[in-house]
Image (tube, helix red, strand yellow):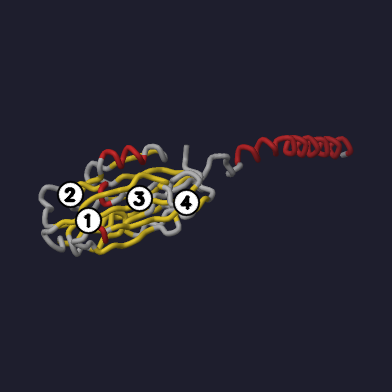
Amino acid sequence: MRKTNKLLAGLISLSLAVSVSAMPALAAEGDTSSTEPTTYVVTFRPGEHGRFTDSFINDLKACGEVRTSEATGAVAVQLDEGDTLPNAPQLTDIVMNEDASRYFVTDAAQGYTGGTAGGDLDAVAQYTLRASTEDAVFTVQYLDRETGAEVAPTLQGSAPVGQNLTFYALNNIENYTAEVASQQLTVSANADENVVTFYYTAGVNRPRK
């Protein structure tokens, strides 16, 4: 009986020793934490009446891995959590389809707010019927609030007089932060009145390298 008890005690002790020694290995294998950063996808959709320009798609490639849809023209870019979001497409980044002459793009990325990646985003271009057959030039400036100096090249394009347009600040200008994410303009026949100015202040901004 004593021999049986000693043998049983020995087996229990051996079993416990093996279990304890195996715990670190098991914990490592079952550890769900990861050093891999959380990633999110930002998708821009050009809508049914146009397509994004090649230059816009190429610029997105500097932000992360880009995928495009041949069927819809949608462009998606993958970002790590906390990365600066890419610039929204501007009105000039959309080429209208040949059969869409009655329409005009009024907002290339409805609802886009800029900032940093903290979740998946989906922005869709919006169109309306052209407000008129007369076009006028619009100008978008990006200026340092303190010095008035340009922090990015001026953007120019044309749109139908009377059209209400939405413009987006450039989001990834290094060491600058836009005071507002977007602005609207109703196009006037007088080009001097069609000027949108985005002001920037010096601040931490970490565009993806």
Which residue is under mark 1? 105
Q: Earlier in the sequence, mark 2 or mark 4?
A: 2
Question: What amino acid is found at the position of numbered circle 3 in the picture?
Answer: Ala
Which residue is under mark 2? 96
Which residue is under mark 3? 88
> Is 30 left or right of 185, judged from the image as shown?
right
Q: State the image quarter where residue 160 is shown.
A: bottom left
In x, y percent, where is residue 1? Answer: 87, 39
Please tell me which residue is depicted at 23% across the width and 53% down the height of the picture.
Answer: 47
In x, y percent, where is residue 26? Answer: 65, 38
Question: What amino acid is found at the position of numbered circle 1 in the picture?
Answer: Val
Pointer 2 and pointer 4: residues touching (CB < 8 Å)?
no
In x, y percent, where is residue 106? Answer: 24, 58
- Secondary structure beneath dot 4 equals loop
- As drawn, 170 above or below 2: below
Question: What amino acid is found at the position of numbered circle 4 in the picture?
Answer: Thr
Q: Residues within 10 Å of mark 1 (few under 14, many from 20)?
A: many
- Residue at the far right: name it: 2
Which residue is under mark 4? 147
